[in-house]
Amino acid sequence: MSAITQAHRIVVKVGTSTLTYDSGRLNLRRVETLCKVLADLQNAGHQMVLVSSGAMGVGMGKAGIRRRPDEIARRQALAAVGQCELMFIYDKFFGEYNRTVAQVLMTADVLERPHSRRNVENTFSALMEMEIIPVVNENDTVAVDELEGPSFGDNDTLSAIVTELTDADLLVILTDIDGLYDSDPRQNPQARRIPYVPVITPQIEALAGGAGSSRGTGGMITKIRAARRVNGRGVPCCIVSGSDPTILYDLLAGRQVGTTFGGEER
């Protein structure tokens, strides 16, 4: 059995481009499917943690703004609007499948203080003991210092840190591309997906390309760096398409989907 099929505690990160349409509005069908799958996997005995992007993207959609503003105050305001909307939807959909969720907003400085770090770890532990699914995002709405000072930079990095804090067995990143390719599949129709990367080398990083969508902050490079971080702790990371969240069933059943970094080659 591979480390993936045996994974008990699983962190799933979902990106803004997966959660929303091009308009910035939530893709409700996809969000509901995601919640249904995570609730079902929790019912099956897994412990699930969701790291969710999308607050600013959803806030932009709700406010009718198509371009990410440059002003920090406006970005904070949109994130505040979007975070409220996002958690309302998660609470509604998870509740329909008899699962309770908790919002966990983190700032990078908690990792620099041992006491704060222990508090976060204890919170995650208590939530999972109560079979509550944590929904995690960076707290970028409270103070300007948090946006200009220490930050995770992107939720791919945050998901790797949450994997460490929760001592998870597996990190799965749902995104708008179904893995790492040997060239950009949007420009080269002959590009081939790489199913397994045992070690992340500079050559692998060079395949990652540039930034992500206009609604998100990360690209493939941030996902590969997140994978490298958790691989350093012996934890595999899988980058898979988030277009249909039921792909998580295939992944945990041992079928080859996306790109797996580290762990056992299948």
Image (cartoon, rainbow, N blue to C red):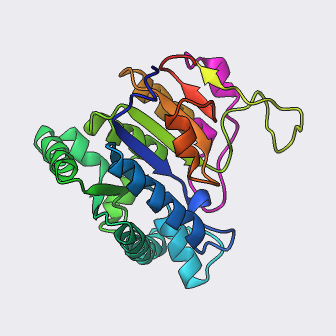
Which residue reaches farthest left?
Answer: 115
Q: Tell me residue 165's x, y (percent).
A: 26, 38
Q: Give the range drawn in magenta.
A: 198-222
| Secondary structure mostly seen in the magenta stretch | loop
Q: Does the magenta stretch include residue 220?
A: yes
Task: Answer above or below: position of 244 versus 100.
Answer: above
Q: Write down the quadrant of residue 232 in the picture.
A: top left
Q: Is residue 73 left or right of residue 133?
A: right
Task: Answer above or below: position of 59 versus 263.
Answer: below
Mark yes or no: residue 55 visible.
Answer: yes
Q: Tell me residue 190's x, y (percent).
A: 89, 32
State the residue at coordinates (43%, 78%): 81
Q: Is residue 256 left or right of residue 186?
A: left
Q: Is residue 93 magenta?
A: no
Q: Tell me residue 178's x, y (percent).
A: 67, 41
Depth check: 112 or 36 in front?
Answer: 36
Q: Quadrant of the C terminus?
A: top right
Which residue reaches farthest right?
Answer: 189
Q: In this view, does 173 lie to the left or right of 215?
A: left
Depth check: 238 or 109 in front?
Answer: 238
Give the mark count. Answer: 0
State the residue at coordinates (30%, 55%): 134
Which residue reaches farthest front?
Answer: 44
